Amino acid sequence: MNLQIDYQIVATGKRKFSFREAGEGPTLVLLHGIGSNAGSWCNQLVTLSDHFRVIAWDTPGYGESTPLNEPQPLARDYADALAMFLDVMQIQECCLVGHSMGTLIAAAFVRKHFRTTALGLTSCAMGYRMQPDDPVPENIAERLRNLEELGPEGVAQARAARLLSKTAGQEQVDQVRETMAQIRPDGYRQAMMMLAQGDLEADAVHVETPCLVLCGTDDQITPESHSQRIAEVIAGSQYQSLPGAGHLCYIDQPETFNSTLRNFFFPQPR
């Protein structure tokens, strides 16, 4: 799929945010994962814009978005940046979808800022719960070493196919690889440290917003059991398994992913 939604940039104070936007109606905000950016949501921007004003942001330190000030930010720091972005966009409330790292930001945002009418958590990243005096978890340290040694393009070449199912087409793999090659080392390092310190379950237990949790059965990065656990923690949430989908389920199986979101956020009357 070769869809293009142009980047836009807004600024507030010394901070700027880049994003993509399509459609009109209730606002649906999409938060990407650690190796991605706003452009990864191109299918959702086009397909879901018939019912929503769809906005995919670049997390601070991604795209043209200003990195956070903290060298080791927490999920709530990203959540505060999201609130700042919504303010400058004049968005009072929204439906919110987070993927992987974006689930940590989304849950922290819902806990701290009461502006979400419905929530989608996809391929949940639980976080490593690193405390201030703890060593950096080996998985995080290894990925940071890979970035240092290989650079963004090398990381993308080595990692992209693992984010999809084995049945994904070459066009999908190429899309993921091209997107991942655009990561900025400064933003990626900050996001990795947020993931190291993150604790999704601690924030999720406070979520009272209507919530849908999704995960692919072939997810090699964030096992489906993690997402199922988060669905158990959030009272009244719905869980939807996506058979055969990999970690980037919204790229791997966009039709199923989009219809599932649409049915949750925009249910048809019976």
Image: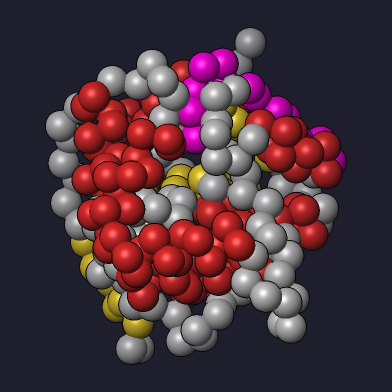
Q: Which residue is painted at 46% across and 59% down in the image?
A: 143
Q: Is residue 135 shown left or right of residue 149?
A: right
Q: Nearer the viewer, residue 89 or 174?
A: 174
How many discs mark residues in the rendered view?
Answer: 0
Q: Nearer the viewer, residue 29 or 52?
A: 29
Q: Specify the quadrant that holds the N terminus.
A: top left
Question: Magenta region's main secondary structure?
Answer: loop
Is 41 magenta? The answer is no
Q: Residue furthest top?
A: 270
Give coordinates of residue 40: x percent, y percent. 32, 43
Where, by quadrant of the figure, is residue 212 drawn? top right
Q: Which residue is painted at 41% across and 20% down in the image?
A: 166
Q: Is residue 64 shown left or right of residue 137?
A: left
Q: Which residue is painted at 28% across and 20% down in the image?
A: 169
Q: Which residue is painted at 82% across and 53% down in the image?
A: 205
The magenta-colored residue range is: 235-247
Q: Specify the quadrant that holds the C terminus.
A: top right
Q: Can residue 259 be seen?
A: no
Give coordinates of residue 218: x percent, y percent. 55, 24
